[in-house]
Image (cartoon, grey):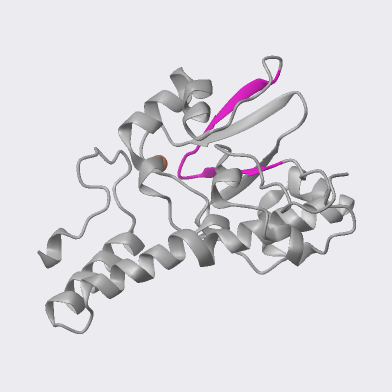
Amino acid sequence: MAHDHDHDHDEEHTHPPSDLELRVKALESLLVEKGLVDPTTLDALIDTYEHRVGPRNGAQVVAKAWVDAEFRQWLLRDATAAVASLGFEGRQGEHLKVVENTATTHNLVVCTLCSCYPWTVLGLPPSWYKSAPYRARAVSEPRAVLAEFGTELPVDTSVRVWDSTAELRYLVLPSRPAGTQGWSEDQLAELVSRNSMIGVEPASAPPVESSA
Ligand code: FE
């Protein structure tokens, strides 16, 4: 029913929900109950934030880091400030750290306790991110998890797993795909999926044209 619209259902939530989360839930229940909002519409809206709006912010950040070396340095040093300079600001007390994939290190983000996630740059977390199996296995067998997303890393690439908290959240800076020389930030941002910024997938390869 209306009050049962809970995406976290069967999981123990270690941090109590914030004031904001409680207010949002209360509002949502009320709107649905009064018939002002159709739950299906609401799901569509959530889907939009989960897949489109939210992650597009992160994709812009990544694309800018790929073309602007100075911004990239700033982002790696103080992601909260660098990201805020683009107009994406988080809630108070929430810090963002950007971790960069390199030829030798691949980064993967998880919240082992619950579902902490960098909302300002990625929007709402996907349900698999909040699931108990992901939260446990991202730490115990990250390569197996990556393989399930179709991501096979070279054996000599090390996998570094970052455990998010309410105070510190992580965003992966994926490697810039080959064959994208001269691309604009907007073009590059199209290659940056939500999953690549969680670290379960690489950024997309450019559509088949010339392979440089
Ligand atoms: Fe959490």
Which residue is at 63% across, 32% downward?
107
Residue 211 figure quarter: top right
Say left or right for 62 vs 152.
right
Residue 22, image x, y percentages: 27, 62
Say left or right for 211 vs 54.
right
Q: Which quadrant is the N terminus positioned in?
A: bottom left
Extreme residue toward the front, this view: 209
Residue in front for this viewpoint, 192 or 101: 192
Residue in front for this viewpoint, 123 or 17: 123
Which residue is at 22% across, 77% downward?
38
Q: Is residue 96 magenta?
A: no
Query: In terms of secondary structure, what is the magenta stretch mainly?
Result: strand
User: Is residue 4 at least partly visible in the picture?
Assistant: yes
Residue 139, image x, y percentages: 47, 23
User: Is residue 170 at least partly visible in the picture?
Assistant: no
Which residue is at 59% across, 52% downward?
193
Vertical comparison of 135 with 190: above or below:
above
Which residue is at 58% across, 38% downward?
199
Extreme residue toward the left, this view: 1
Residue 161, image x, y percentages: 56, 27
Residue 11, image x, y percentages: 24, 39
Total of numbered circles in the picture?
0
> Which segment did they paint magenta?
157-174
Residue in front for this viewpoint, 32 or 30: 32
Say left or right for 193 vs 163.
right
Say left or right for 195 vs 28.
right
Q: Is residue 165 magenta?
A: yes
Residue 160 figure quarter: top right
Ligand 1 quarter of the rendering: top left
Vertical comparison of 79 with 148: above or below:
below
Q: Which quadrant is the C terminus positioned in?
A: top right
